[in-house]
Amino acid sequence: MCIRDRGGQGELGHPGSDTAAVLHAVSEHGVVGAVSEIAGPFTLVVWDPREEKLWLGRDALGRRSLVWTVDGDGGLIFSSAPVPEYSWRELPPGLYCVNLGDHQSERVIAKHRWSPGSVQEELGLHLETMSHPAATECGGTSDQFLEVLSSSVGRRVATAPDQRVAVLFSGGLDSAVIGRLVHEHMPPELPIELVNVSFGKNGSYETPDRLTAEATLTELKELAPGREWLLVCVNVSLEEAACEAERLRDLIAPLDTVMDHNIGMAFWFAARGEGWVNCEPYRVQSRVLLMGAGADEQLAGYSRHRGAWERGGDAELQCELQMDFKRLWTRNLGRKHPTL
């Protein structure tokens, strides 16, 4: 979490804890002002005893889970880690208020109008006004994007214990780029752990993701031959996956599609960090695991994006990307945070 100062800059962390940082911001600027000062992923619940209001917030992209339900007595329950006793619903990204001073039999979760500037800044992109850059501008745009991404990776590496991070590594473009940027920022004497999960079938773990990871590893070694790259192969049997299925369903609730389950399962076993390196048992040493999330949605990486562009040019593509942004919190991000 990053708390901005009034000049628009921010500092990672806070002397004490994130909770202390938020409470300090609330005491100075109020709940609405404090939320506008937060950059990065967050979920928070703040009780205002003077106004008798309960405030609930989730960052604009929905990168942290927040769910709610109603108990048998009509009381509202909120949680970032749901338990299986209740049927939960996800709270969409935004800022909400429950007026507990209004003694009504039915509680209302009212959405507060967030400062438009803060949401636009959090998204980092205004699709409605985005124009297609000229060919001469594309190089500068991509360079700027890479600079921002590299800075973000560098800040996370700098704050990791011993400046060590691992990468959740499918071998795809997003994880390959993250791995390459980690190389730029991690001390050169440390190995970079690339964690790849494969679910076995008929005793074989040579799945498409494993083969892609091995091929991409070869490219990374060619780009940075002086770095020690460790491909940590997490091999999961179907029997082992079945044993964890019930626990995983509780973690990703209320999401319950087959894709939610499969992706959540991969994150769950990756986060354990137990696998094999060069046919020897290995446990990941890094305490921070980086992953690519939402890259295809941000950079039009799906075939349907090309189809939209072919049908209606920039306008059609922007509509498709806008749809992706609006549902990013429920299709991509909500299932990842609880499992990790």
Image (spheres, helix red, strand yellow):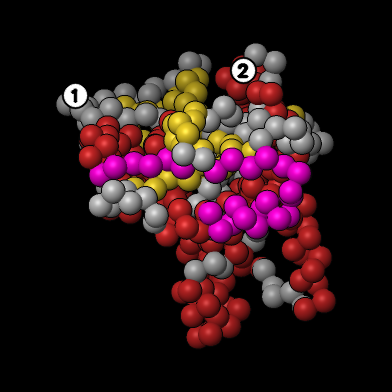
Query: Would residue 96 be found to the left or right of residue 60 on screen?
Result: left
* Amino acid bearing label 2: Ser
Q: Quadrant of residue 151?
A: top right
- Observer-nearest residue: 265 or 190? 190
**Magenta residues?**
214-238
Give the residue at x 78% y 57%. 144
| Residue on which disc 2 sits | 17
Query: Would residue 243 be found to the left or right of residue 206 on screen?
Result: left
Q: Quadrant of residue 111?
A: top left
Q: Nearer the viewer, mark 1 or mark 2?
A: 2
Where is residue 333 shown, x and y percent of the image?
A: 46, 46
Q: Is residue 234 magenta?
A: yes
Q: Is residue 330 magenta?
A: no
Give the secondary structure at mark 1.
loop
Task: Name the residue at the front extreme.
Answer: 279
- How packed mark 1 is, by other alpha carbons closer than 10 Å (few <14, some 14-19, many 20 or more), is few
Where is residue 169 shown, x and y percent of the image?
A: 53, 48
| Residue on which disc 1 sits | 73
Q: Between disc 1 and disc 2, whose residue precedes?
A: 2
Q: CA distance from mark 1 to mark 2?
A: 35 Å
Where is residue 330 shown, x and y percent of the image?
A: 40, 50
Would residue 91 be seen by someone viewing this image from the given angle?
A: no
